[in-house]
Image (tube, grey):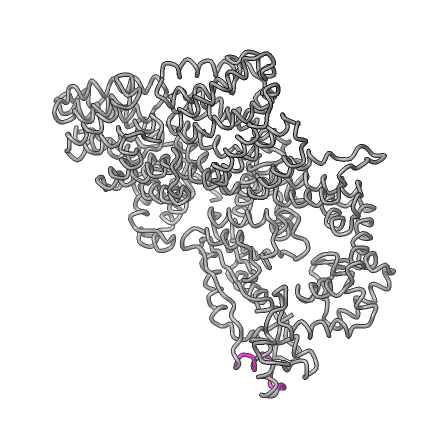
Amino acid sequence: MPDSSAPPHGNGALVGRTEVVRLLATEAERAAAGEFRLVELSGDPGAGKTRLLGETAGAASRHGLTVLRGRATEYENDVPLSLAVDALDDEVENRAEQVRAALDPESARLLADVFPALPADRPGPDTAAAPSTGLNRYRVHRAVRLLLEALAAPGGLAVLLDDVHWADEGSVELLSHLARHPPRGPLLLAVTYRTRQAGPRLTAALADSAPGLRTRIDVAPLTLRETGEFLGPSVGARRRRALYEASGGNPLYLEALARSAPAAATPAGSAAESAAPPDDGLLPNAVREALAAELAALPADARLAAQAAATLGDEFEPGMVAVAALTTEAEALAALDELAVRDVVRCAPAPGRFRFRHPVVRHLAYASSGAGWRVAAHARVAAALDERDAPTVTRARHIARSARFGDLLSVGVLVEAARATAYQSPATAAQWLRTALDLLPEKPGGTAAGPAPDRLSLLVELARLQGVGGRLVQGRDTALEVLRLLPPDAWAQRARAARFCAILERLLNRQAQGRALLRSELGRVPPEHAADAVPLHLQLIGDSLIRADFAAAAEQLDRLTAVLSRPGGGTEAGGGAPDDWVPLVVLRLGCAYGAGDLDAAHGLAAAAERLTEEATDAELAPWLESLSFLCWIDAMMGRLPQAARTVERSLAIANATGQSYLSPWMLTAQAFTCGRTGRLAEAVDRAEDAVDAARLLGSDECVALALAVKSLMVRWTGDAAAALALADEAIRHADGRREWWARLGAVGRGLALVELQEVDAGAAQVLAACDEFVDPLLERSCLLVCCEAMADAEAERGRPAAAAGWADRAAAVPGGGTGSGHAVLARAHAEQDGDPAAAARGAGRAAELFAATGERLFAARAWLRAGTAHARCGQKAAARTELARAAEVFGACGALGLHARTVREQRKLGVRAGRGAAQTDGRLSRREAEVAELVRQGFSNQRIAERLFLSPRTVETHVAHVFAKLGVSSRAAVAGKLAGVRGPEG
């Protein structure tokens, strides 16, 4: 093929790619120097991408990188993470001990299910951590990233992936993760794909890469002069021009036309006509005809072997060629000899195996066989694989192309394959399940092995797989199909199906359509079956709460309560009377809290806590969305221990029952809870989990919420620039929607601007997010946080009147009186200048309130204000005590900006507060670790900024964070600290 060998009429040299080769060598050099680099080579089939990938391999080897290669194939894109396995598995086997030592137990367990080469003595499964299906596959992506980091040590790694336009869904998701979360260390990731065949998910995945790490190269056609070099001096000028016009300068097309008779190289019509793609857009007509003529000219036995080989895979063995062609193995070997002589196939790297010289040749060989013959060939291969006890997924690939309608054994294999791949790639699993359903009769009779699968159950399973696989529209359509197939009087089943459909409509930002469906179904239910319609009521109430329409929620609650109060009202499974039924109590709690009735809310929260603790997981599983409300409301009310317990249990139930489409909401609530208790590193991690899960789900609502919460957590760490970027992305995903979660991004943006000393712009943003405090969509605790933060900012720049205005707003929020730490602290900020003694008392009171609820960071903010107020009163000893308490908490939590501010106040009082006071648990973020490593190597901030494509100001912030977290005060000390962490072997 032209990508890797000389054309038959050419000189064998790489032509017309000098500048590209130079750029690839530069990328390999940068990777060898310790950077992660992502290189894309895109172009038409045969443009020379694979040949350039070979040049990349050579450059990487010259710079000392270990080179690993993988390739996606046209007909085998149904094995999850097949690209990663193809590229890495051999190296994992060779370095199994190193890999085992580098991975934590959970990552090792997750990867053992992906890579056959990983040792079998891995830790046992943890069903809570690794469900059989769901959104938690981002954990697998992270584990692969850790594996790449391990394999990149010590000399560096180049992973070269070819033809990724054919990659399976799981591999595309993995590429997206690596592009957004680049592995640390010397690593080059190079991919090739066909520009016109790359799907939107692949292009979006690569486009999401971290700034400055991605290099995209369009592999352009050769010029007329370069075409002459490629063909060599034996081709005359007239034929050279004809070949160039017919091929468009594409090396593969040039080779195919040059192999054919001279007449075939001359276009029948204009050059534009001959180069027009056929219906599938794969090849120009002249090239297709030339390659087809090459295959047609083969002896019959060789042509049959080529067609049989094309059914098998990218690589194939002679024995299976014989099975597919229905010949003996000796005849297959003789035919393969003929194909190798004619350069149709070549020896593969693996001993005893072959591959086609180019994927296009395989494509045409497959298409040249009869459709009926292909069905029979796949059936023969499937039977042979069954005899060899091959993996289910390998068999399923051939069964899907050959099974007869009504073949229940084949249906069973496809269903088994779907369930085997559901965790790593639910989208792939959904394809298997859809195929199984297409083969399943409406009323199958079953087999001797057992009854036939239930069609409706498989459709429900399919809808969930499509949902968690990010195919929300398909999942919604499948749920609607379930509704159409259900009998009109199957009230309970219809209610569950409609509820699930409404959830997917919400995730698609089609809330109105979801409500319309729920009301339509509700209107059809006769009074005597009102209990069966409870899920419809619950979903309508939850939708109203999310929209902050508390009046509509209360009205719907009254109707639901009336239904549940009747004999047989539907609460028996949940514990009896309506007042003892968890979903109803939680929704009442949401209404009371949202409406500002905090006394009622506290009573209902206590009841909800008691009832959930008494209920089993099985009792809670059908109503898990209600439990996700409880996670959030507990956190907002300051019931942080209860929120932490509820969210952990909710996640476990979601994972165990296949409802992980709800997990982004729960993970975000977990991040919110961790942040309020001062566990900032954990909060940022959980928020990142939520972002990754939401992206896999494909829901803008969930992505916007997760990014907004992550922005708020990152702001606490002192990285205001990163917080601002996250908030801006959250706002883009919210897209102007009028719901409380959509306002959080604007809050994050406003508070980040305040941290960046753009207080006026930040205040305007916060006011807008809070709807000027006139019927705000934001819930009360967030309103109070905004008021306290803005009062502090205005007080710090000497504007007590503006600070008092924010304190007044806090007091007007329901629950914002003297029992609210935020309101009391906001007033203390405002009194800092005019009445510092009152400010000190108020801040002390606020600290007590925060400490009682476990909100450590807010308590520390109150101690900081108390310290500055005492200082203004001349009470230096009290000031030092309060500031020391604040500094200790800020340092321990990793709130580095607030810690630095506290240290400045301490120094004004003559306290020698060293940087050691800011020590945390030493956990550097990924970016901080990169900066620390470059500091160790002696790079200046300016050079670090250039290498990481950051602003110098951002680098300064990261360096300050590194100093504080490592407890050092110089760049030399960073080097010493890192050396100590690595130990004598470094």
- For the point 52% across and 32% down, the residue is 662
Q: In this view of the protein, which residue sits in the foreground, 781 or 676?
A: 781
In the picture provided, is 970 more to the left or to the right than 358? Answer: left
Left or right: 968 with respect to 697?
A: left
In x, y percent, where is residue 52?
Answer: 55, 66
Instruction: Kindly indicate the quadrant of the structure image that contains residue 465.
Output: top right
Tell me what residue is drawn at x 16 percent, y 26 percent.
Answer: 832
Give the camera-side residue of 832 and 66: 832
- In this rendering, the answer to whether 635 lies above or below 710 is above
* Viewport quadrant of the N terminus: bottom right
Q: Is residue 131 magenta?
A: no
**914 or 713: which is nearer to us?**
713
Q: Position of residue 610 (x, y in %)?
A: 49, 13
In the rendered structure, does residue 228 fall within the stretch colored magenta? yes
Where is 147 relative to 158, above or below?
above
Looking at the image, residue 799 sits to the left or right of residue 333; the answer is left
- Looking at the rendering, the stretch of residues picked out in magenta corresponds to 225-235
- Residue 120: name its quadrant: top right
Q: Can I make out residue 423 in this image?
A: no
**Residue 31 in view, yes or no:** yes
Q: Main secondary structure of the magenta part?
A: helix
Give the percent coordinates (x, y) of residue 946.
35, 55
Left or right of 933? Residue 870 is left
Residue 890 position in % (x across, y down): 31, 29
| Residue at the image point whose x is 26% and y is 31% from the top | 789
| Number of marks present in the image shown | 0
